[in-house]
Image (cartoon, rainbow, N blue to C red):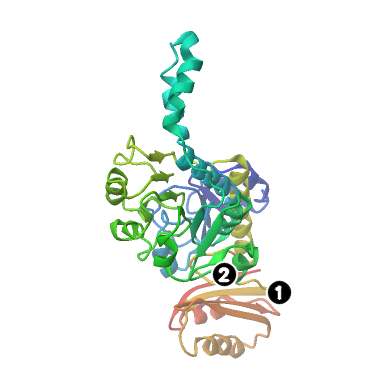
Amino acid sequence: MNKILKLNDISPVADSVFDTNIYNYSKNEVNPQGIMLRSFKMHDYELQENLLAIARCGAGVNNIPVEKCTEKGVVVFNTPGANANAVKEHVLLALLMTSRKIAQSIAWVNTLKDKGNDVPKLVELGKGEFVGPELYKKKLAVVGLGAIGALVANLGISLGMEVYGYDPFISIDSAWNLSRSVKHVTDFDELISSCDYLTLHLPLTETTNEIINSTTIGKMKPDVKIINCARGELVCDDDIITAISNNKAGAYFTDFPNAKLIGKDNIITLPHLGASTPEAEDNCAYAAAKALTDYIENGNITNSVNFPYCNLPRQGIARLTLIHANIKSILNKITQKISDSELNISNLLNKNNGEYAYTVIDIDSDIDSAVIDGLKEIEGMIRVRIIR
């Protein structure tokens, strides 16, 4: 039986993916082959030899030690796009809340609770404090055009906004999904200089950490509204607080509250609700479970953040999967070892993502342990697995 450990509560939709004849799936599994998680922080978690893969129910993997996993041959999956519609709708809320002073007006109306019959008159007298602009014909800058960013860009078009998109690494799929009305900008400074609204849809990396800071804010319009439903660290907290207090930025909406941001004027903080819909949680759980089971049962890799996409229909009696360094002649050494053992290769697929590579080989007969041991001895080999 394969053991799958849950490190968080996961939507029960995943339960149906794990065949009870093949898997034990619970929060109590010891030395598991697979792990399912959402926000559990794994950086201090011991990666045991038996662990084959980790599936994150969501897009971000900052809570997983990806580099350490890669070195040990542990595949890390995520679920890009599974929560995209939920986050898109959350960004719509952010656009409206940074424009129309909705949160402030609700708080003000609550102060009228004991005013009795005077409430309508007071509302008419006070509503002028909460006037805000329409979204129609305003300029929206979308930074990051992945699954979520593309939907947000298209949303902006449907709202009648003038939408500009920036993503140096845009995928073909995302490009196809973008409305033709979205204007693609290749210069970040050009993008931010004239936008009325800026929304971030980026992963957190060394180059994107605090991409919104005093320097970049200084290049924006003084009433710009900045929306961050991606990662808190994309925006420098101190710099955005200073900019808003000095009227260098109009408003900031973030899904990542902290003590510095809470309670500040024109800073709206919500408790990471972007993907908090039952539909998104179901979609993420199902996608994560499918990726995990397909890898365990067939060796196929879909939506991995540390190894290349690799999908090969099963053919033959046994399947070898090999995780190894992407170095010269290693594939020749692999196939030579198999040939020397008088085994016939019926199918083979090799993919790399630069430093590392993944090879899937179908064999027409069973494989004994001596062949496996010989493959493990090849320089640069990280993990060898046989699937029958």
Above or below, 28 relative to 104? below
Q: Answer with the quarter of the image where residue 370 lies.
A: bottom right
| Amino acid found under the numbered disc labelled 1 | Ile
Residue 28 seen anywhere in this rendered image of the structure: no
Residue 111: image location, x then y, percent: 41, 19
Looking at the image, which residue is at 52% across and 49% down?
Answer: 5
* Residue count near mark 2 (Cα–Cα under 10 Å), binned few <14, some 14–19, many ≥20: few
Looking at the image, which residue is at 50% across and 9% down?
Answer: 117
Closer to the camera in the image, 328 or 266? 266
Residue 207: image location, x then y, percent: 36, 66
| Amino acid found under the numbered disc labelled 2 | Ser
Task: Say which mark, if any, is on residue 171.
Answer: 2
Q: Which residue is mark 1?
A: 317
Q: Secondary structure at mark 1?
A: loop
Q: Secondary structure at mark 2?
A: loop
Residue 272: image location, x then y, percent: 46, 42
Kindly report the distance in space between the C-alpha atoms of the residues bearing marks 1 and 2.
36 Å
Could you tell me which quadrant the C terminus lies in?
bottom right
Residue 97: image location, x then y, percent: 48, 39
* Residue count near mark 1 (Cα–Cα under 10 Å), binned few <14, some 14–19, many ≥20: some
Q: Is residue 62 left or right of residue 37?
A: left
Could you tell me which quadrant the N terminus lies in?
bottom right
Closer to the camera in the image, 261 or 361? 261
Q: Is residue 114 left or right of residue 89?
A: left
